Amino acid sequence: MTVTGPVPAASLGAVDAHDHLFLRTPALPGDEFDDLERSTAEALEGRASGIGTIVDMTPIGLGRRPDLMRAVSKATGIPIIGATGYHRDAHYRAGHWVYDASVATLADRIVRDLEVGMHPADWDDPDAPPDAARAGAIKAGASYHHASEAERRRLEACAIGGRRCGVPILVHTEIGTFGHEIVDTLTAFGVAPHRIILAHLDRNPDAELHAEIASRGVYLEYDTMGRTKYRPDSELLDLIEHVVTAGHLDRLLLGQDIGRRSMLRAYGGGPGMRYLMETFVPRVRRRIGDGATDAILVANPARVFALEGPA
Ligand SMILES: [Zn+2]
C-alpha cells in the first residue's frame, strides 16, 4: 500500500526500507525537515541513484505529512509507503496524548490510518478529515534495554493494528538492544514473527545475536551506512556477510533512516539519500554478490511489505 494507492509488491524494485521525507521531534531540536521542494529534490537524487521505493517510517506525532508524501511521490514518480504507529517515549513531549490514551484508542487510530487514510494532524485536531493516503506499515519503538509501561501499551496497540490489517510492524531498537524481548512481547500479542522487523540492530553489530534473532523468523533492518561517527561502513559489510553466511539472507533489509536535516544534501548536509545505492550497495555487491544483494534490496522487501489478510 503506497501513499498513492495499492501496487503489486513485485513492482517495488530496490526498497529503502526505512527512511524519512518529513520529520520533526523534540528529541532532535533544530534538525527538523518539512520543506516540500527540498525533500522532493532529495528524493529525486535517491531515485537517480537507483532507489525504487521509499518506506517513510515517520509515525504519528513526529511531523508525518501524508499530503506532502503524496506530492513528493507524484513529482518524482517514486512509490512511497507511509507508516502509522508510535515511536518510543523520547520522541513525545511530556503530556502528549500518546502517554494517556487507552490501548483501544491507540489501536483505533492506527487502524483508521491503515484502512481509511492517515490523519493529517496526528489527532492533535481529532476532527480533521483523513488524508487520501493510507499507511502501509506500522512503526513502534522501545528504549535502551527496556520498554516503559507506555511503550508496552503502544506495542500492544501496534500488534492489534498489525494483526487486523495484515501489515508489518517495524520496531525501533535503541542502540540495537532489547531485540529478543520486543519479539517476545509482540508474539505474545499474537503477531507472527515474519511480520516483525527490528530496526537499527546494526548499532550493536553482534552477528551471533542477529543470527539468533533472525532464526526466530524476524526481519533485521540495517541502516547505519554512512554513520561514520559511529563506525566505518566496512564493519556493516562484515556484519552483513556474517549474517548471510549464517544462513539468514532472507531476513535482511536495508534502509537509510535519514532522521536529521543535517544528513540531507537538499538542506545543505550529507551524506544524503543517494548514499545507499551510490556508495554502499556497490560494496555490498562486491562482498556477497549480485544475487544476494538483490534479495536484500528487492525480494525481501517485496515479501515483508506485501499486505496479508487479518491474522
Ligand atoms: Zn527512523
Image: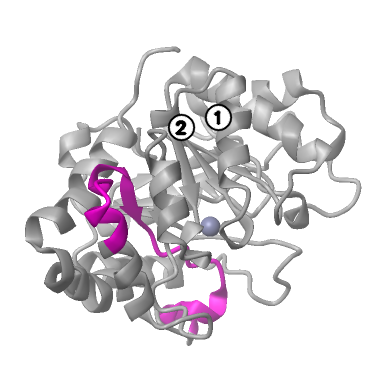
Q: Which of marks 1 and 2 is nearer the N terminus?
A: 1
Q: Does the magenta stretch include residue 140?
A: no
Side of 105 relative to 211 (left or right)? right
> Which residue occupies the foreground of this view, 260 or 182?
182
Name the residue: 42% across, 55% down: 208
**Would you call the spot at circle 2 few (<14 residues within 10 Å), some (14-19), or many (20 or more)?**
many
- The quadrant the C terminus occupies is top left
Q: Which colour scheme is used?
A: one colour
Q: From where the camera sits, is residue 146 visible?
A: yes
Residue 253 spot, x, y in % from top left:
33, 51
The amino acid on which the numbered mark 2 sits, given as a three-letter code, is Arg
Residue 238 spot, x, y in % from top left:
31, 71
Residue 40 spot, x, y in % from top left:
38, 66
- Please name the residue that numbered disc 1 is placed on: 113
Residue 193 spot, x, y in % from top left:
44, 29
Tags 1 and 2 touching, CB below 8 Å:
yes
Side of 69 relative to 296 (left or right)? right
> Which residue occupies the foreground of this view, 112 or 50?
50
Q: Residue furthest top?
A: 310
